Image: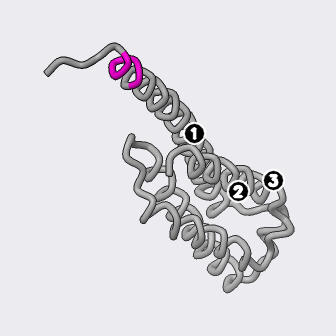
Amino acid sequence: MRYGTSFVLIMAGLGAAACKDGEACTRARHDAANVYEEVMKAASRLKLQGAPGYEELSAEQKGEHYKIWEEIEKQTDMIFKSFAFEKITWNTAEPAKQKAEKAFDGYFDKAEYKGFQTSLEDAAKKFQAAEAACK
């Protein structure tokens, strides 16, 4: 089958547009993966050490602290892994994002973790950018 010049130019233009979108998605996906990896690492550290004043918490509070930070670590790791590969697993990433944010929101001493809160909010922005570029 022989194609006319117009058809070839249209198909080349569509291919270039798809490539540009693909590049934007790849960048957004990498940005989201990187930021969630850092958030996951921070949650892992905070799960074991806590903010100043952590040592004054009761044993029950320390147990709750550990449980919540472990959940945040687990969920942000799932988000990181969802964005780490070319095919984004949205059905894993979206619920994990909600669970991580809910766990942090429910944390009894979250006012002591402003830096982490900022990191989690920045990660959410990268998540939204990936959604806009890739979905």
Circle 3/circle 1 CB separation < 8 Å: no
Q: Which residue lies furthest to the left in this view?
A: 1
* Mark 2 or mark 1: whose residue is earlier in sequence: 1
Q: Is mark 3 on a helix, strand or loop?
A: helix
* Mark 3 or mark 1: whose residue is earlier in sequence: 1
Which residue sits at x=73%, y=63%?
A: 50
Label the magenta part by its dominant secondary structure: helix
Residue highlighted by disc 1: 28
List x then y, in percent, for residue 53: 84, 67
Which residue sits at x=71%, y=82%?
A: 61
Amino acid at dot 2: Leu
In the picture, the disc for residue 115 is 3
Alpha-carbon distance for marks 2 and 1? 16 Å
Q: Select label 2 or label 1 by which is in front.
A: 1
**1 in relation to 28, above or below:** above
Q: Is mark 1 on a helix, strand or loop?
A: helix
Amino acid at dot 3: Gly
- Disc 2 packing (10 Å; few <14; some 14–19; many ≥20): many
**110 in relation to 79, above or below:** below
List x then y, in percent, for residue 92: 43, 64
Q: Is residue 99 toward the left or the right of residue 10 in the image?
A: right
Residue highlighted by disc 2: 120
Span highlighted in magenta in the image: 6-10
**129 in relation to 102, above or below:** above
Which image quarter is the N terminus in?
top left
List x then y, in percent, for residue 74: 50, 64
List x then y, in percent, for residue 58: 74, 83
